[in-house]
Image (cartoon, rainbow, N blue to C red):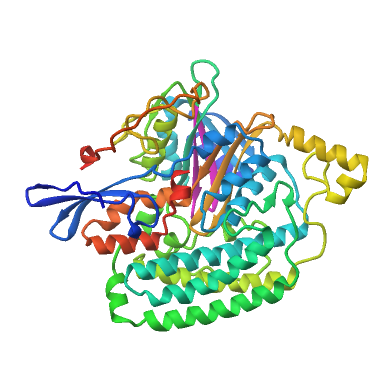
Amino acid sequence: MDQSIDEIKKEIGEDVIEISLCDGEVVLKVESTKWKDVVDALKDKCKFDMLIDLCAVDYRDGDERFEVVVHLYGLGIKKRIRVKSRCSGEIQSVCDIYPAANWFEREAYDLFGIHFEGHPNLKRILCHDNFEGHPLRKDFDKRKRSDILKPNDLMDEM
Amino acid sequence: MQHTMIFEDNKMYLNIGPSHPAMHGCFRVLVELDGERISKAVPEIGYLHRCFEKEAESHRWDGILPYTDRLNYVSPLMNNVGYCMAVERLMNLEIPERANWIRMLICEVSRICDHLVCLGANLVDVGALTNYWYLFNERELFVDWIEALCGARLTSSYTRIGGLSRDIPSGTPEILKKCLKGTSKALNQVEKIIKRNRIFTDRTVGVGVITEDDAISYGFTGPCLRAAGCDYDVRKVDGYYHYDDVNWDIPVGESGDTFDRIFVRFEEIRQSSRIIEQILERIPEGPIAMDRGNISLPPKHDVYGSIEGMIRHFKIVMEGISPPPGEVYSCTEAANGELGFYIVSDGSDRPYRIKVRPPCFSIYQAYPKMIEGHTVADAIAIMGSLNIIAGELDR
């Protein structure tokens, strides 16, 4: 496992804040400004060719309260990696690197209100378009109710 | 289908779903039709969104388990296993050997049930109605066994953090061997009916093709990825439980069309049967749950018969389990692909964040691309072969 850490360090060493091992998996922490570069390098140079999951966590501490977490897998090298970045609500989209990120980023936008710059179609996915607020934020008022009267049009995506 | 039809430049817009018997759940796809062919499609999901992730943040670790039943409701036992395995990895727990083997057993039984449902329904989509009964009859026998196992047919909630809730029912090997025999017979019969059937091959070969590269870039996992030619299977890659110790192969397709997806599932049922036969031979005797005071409930006779047992029971029921602060991503091979749980714990009795990575979510993303250029009837057949389950898609 140390070997894979060295390899990753060699390729993208200067962009990473912290590199560690968690339960046998390499975990990278990066600056939000370097987010896209690191993910791109992991796909191109380190052969992580599959985006398994992308999600966000709300830590509710300070300005950079959100953490965007992405799990990648390399089919050839048979390794998993987790990349994390703190952000204040804006981060670059990785959609054009991994098409799979499209809906995952829409979900993170829907539930946390994180804006993914450069996303081709950043709109709500699980909640209705007229829903107010971002429900997975820790300060979301759970008692709040919204009236949804009309179905989504969807013609804007046509 | 809703009646919102707009005519414009000879194009017709049609809503398929959200409530339509052919949609296998609650999905809505707005399609632009050029004649009978679909020229563009926009899917909408979320009709079955029930805030699983938000709900989980306000429940105890063990209280979340019943909610996992509802993720992929066609094979709920596998979701139970996936969730418990994630929490156990977070807490660094080693569950007893017997529990490991039983978990493998229930996963494979669920996989067979799930595939039988998918195949049965998918064949109905292409007009082969008879096969539905051949396959569902066999599934019924497995579900009867699941009912004997945990008292429920669908909402199983069978596993526990640190083991299982109860042992397998007596006579299990005989019952399951009989089920497997019946399944194998049914599969052969169905295969005989459809494999060289002209109508069936016309409806499935070359329909809804997704290439291996596309499937990987969309994050496909499970039978849909394997039908496209990539042999990724979490059971082989991670080798969790005892999947490394039993003999089985990964069936792989070639062209990634509906036909391949159907036959990869056929073959997976046979491989699961192989695994089950080996498990039944090798399943060891022993406890089914960890004997740890702060994790698993003591046996009932201890609760009623000793003060220590009662205190232990009381403490777990009142205080729950508290994993150490940390995070984990744990995945298992569910019937549709990689079912992942990303869990963040802050050390309290409730999870800080749970993210479910449902296999369908990635797969359904590619659906519009797969149906463009096909007819409406093909779109239904493609959807059936992808086996999209609204419960895990929308959470």
Q: Is residue B211 left or right of residue A4?
A: left
Depth order, front residue of B101/B25: B25
Give the percent coordinates (x, y) of residue B109: 60, 65
- Which residue is located at x 27 percent, y 57 percent? B371
Q: Quadrant of residue B284?
A: bottom right
Secondary structure predominantly adopted by residues drawn in magenta: strand
> Going by the picture, which residue comes out furthest to the top?
A62
Depth order, front residue of A114/A128: A128
For the magenta stretch, what is the residue range?
A: A67-84
The answer to whether residue A72 is magenta is yes
Q: In this view, does B302 lie to the left or right of A114?
A: right
- Which residue is located at x 78 percent, y 52 percent? B289
Q: Quadrant of the N terminus of chain A?
A: top right
- Which residue is located at x 53 percent, y 24 percent? A138
- Which residue is located at x 40 percent, y 38 percent? A126
- When the figure is inspected, residue B311 is found, relative to residue B388, above or below; the finding is above
> Going by the picture, which residue comes out furthest to the left?
B9
Give the percent coordinates (x, y) of residue B311: 86, 37
Depth order, front residue of B389/A4: B389
The answer to whether one can see residue A14 in this image is: no
Give the percent coordinates (x, y) of residue A116: 36, 30
The answer to whether residue B330 is magenta is no
Depth order, front residue of A54/B99: B99
Q: Quadrant of residue B153?
A: bottom right
Q: In this view, does B20 lie to the left or right of A137?
A: left
Q: Quadrant of residue B257?
A: bottom left
